[in-house]
Amino acid sequence: MQNTQQIQNQAETYAFRPVWLRLTVQMAALSLIAGVAVLLAEVLPFQLEPVIGRPLSILLVVVPVLFWLTLSVLPEYRFARPRRRLIGVAVVSCLTASAIGLPLVESFYVVDRWLPLQSVFARVIGYTFTAGIVDVGLKFVVLRYVIYPQGLRVRSDAVAYAFAAAVGYSFYLNLAQIWRMDPTWDVAALTVLATTTIQLASSLFIALGLVESYFGDAFPLVLPTNLFVAAIAAGIISALYPGFISGVLTPAGSAARPLFGLAMLVAAWCLSMGLTYFLYATSERREREAFGGRGDFDGV
Amino acid sequence: MEFETGRSPAIQITPRQRWSIAFSYALIVIGLTLGVNQRDSFLHQTSQYNNFEAGISASYPARWLLDESDANIFRVRDMSHAGYNTEIEVSSIPVGADAAERNLLDRISMQRAQFLVDYTVLGYDAYSLPDESQAIAMSYSFVWRDASPFLNSVSSIVNGLDILTVRRGQALVISFRADAAVYDRELQTLSAFLDNLQF
């Protein structure tokens, strides 16, 4: 109670950059690009030459970062008190994915050798406790040491920084995957959307945990529970996406179904954002009611 | 421009928050450990093979394909990836009382040289089986190319190891073959296979 009073006494009002709407715009734009790429690949009667296709695929890796820089980072500096550590969080997350995340999942857990052949349920559990927990753990550690608690002034800060971690982390995963696989540009667009969606979904649950823990001073198990849910979200999307994008195996072979994959990814990020926003808004409303209406905005 | 009420960044974290961070680290460590456990249980899952006629029983990786259709006693192959499928083949050759193990290996080599591209014997060595009985091992390599003309795959080097031991008037040959790129890693599978092989 003493801590809560201390918090109340030191509260002040900031001008802030809205987060949720911009986040939605970025994901919608990314989905639109993937959709256009898929449709063009279906309609166009020819394949792009590798000399054009490869640079185009690599360029697609940079698109989420460009969106984020344009819509989230640069506008911050029009305000008196911007979120100064956004780029730092993204860069450290990217380096963490490169140094620890990807090597751990690929070389230590060797998921490609045993997970893709399992049943859907086993794949969900498998991805949750390998790639999911690695990604979530690393992003949590980055956020803990870069922004927690000094960088958290308002609730939406946690969401903005968690998204920065998702953008940085997914940038390296996308780059490594597309550099190695050298896919056609429509597959590259879907891969970028898939990785960004997985990282976004898990980051939002991490943000929710940080918000509840720091601003709500919640029960100590709330933050780890949110991290666990974040890993499960990553596990579910990672396990289901290949099933949606690959056609049913028949004696005549199997054809890719990129539109199914795209629809699944759009549904996944809409669902995860909708759910986390609902919980975020509910928790904020609860706190506002508890403290007599201080702070009139919900950060949308 | 919108406004939100925030708190001063100078505030210290509360004991509850400290505990929640500690529990979070604990969750991550437990999750990573469960992942290792899951990986091991899937990768080391085995199926049992029994051939009472030949007096052989063995445990082979559950993901591998068992094939008893050839002249050999049985063969198991890892079909889960593209390229050369890592395989373990067990075959028996009836031998006389004075048969030399080295001669048997030479005979196998001569047969193989007729249908394997660039088949080269790399060397012979003594080999101790898990039951401490002695065997002779022959390592070799050859060039493999996918049989399908539609795949346009690049040739790859395959390393092989034959382990031959003579018991009860029969020579048992355990042949292990894998792409040179994964050969060292896959030797663990052979080692686990030999640990459970009974004949």
Image (cartoon, grey):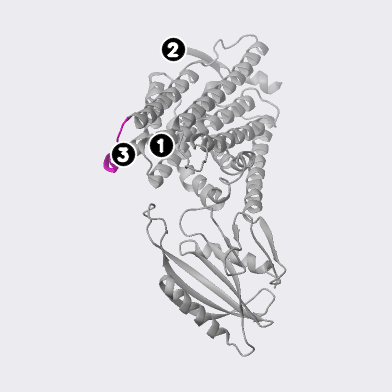
Mark 2–mark 1 CB contact (< 8 Å): no
Subunit under mark 2: B
Q: Which residue is mark 3?
A: A53
Mark 3–mark 1 CB contact (< 8 Å): no
Same chain? Circles 3 and 1? yes
Q: Which residue is mark 2?
A: B1
Q: Is residue A262 visible?
A: yes
Of A168 and A58, nearer the camera is: A58
Give the spatial CA distance, label 2 vs label 1.
39 Å
Between tags 2 and 1, which lies in front? Answer: 1
Q: Residue at x 47, y 68 (%)?
A: B159
The first of marks 3 and 1 along the sequence is 3
Q: Quadrant of residue B24?
A: top right
Q: Quadrant of the N terminus of chain A?
A: top right
Q: Is residue A153 visible?
A: no
- Amino acid on which disc 3 is placed: Gly
Give the spatial CA distance, label 2 vs label 3.
42 Å
Of B100 and A97, nearer the camera is: B100
- Amino acid on which disc 2 is placed: Met
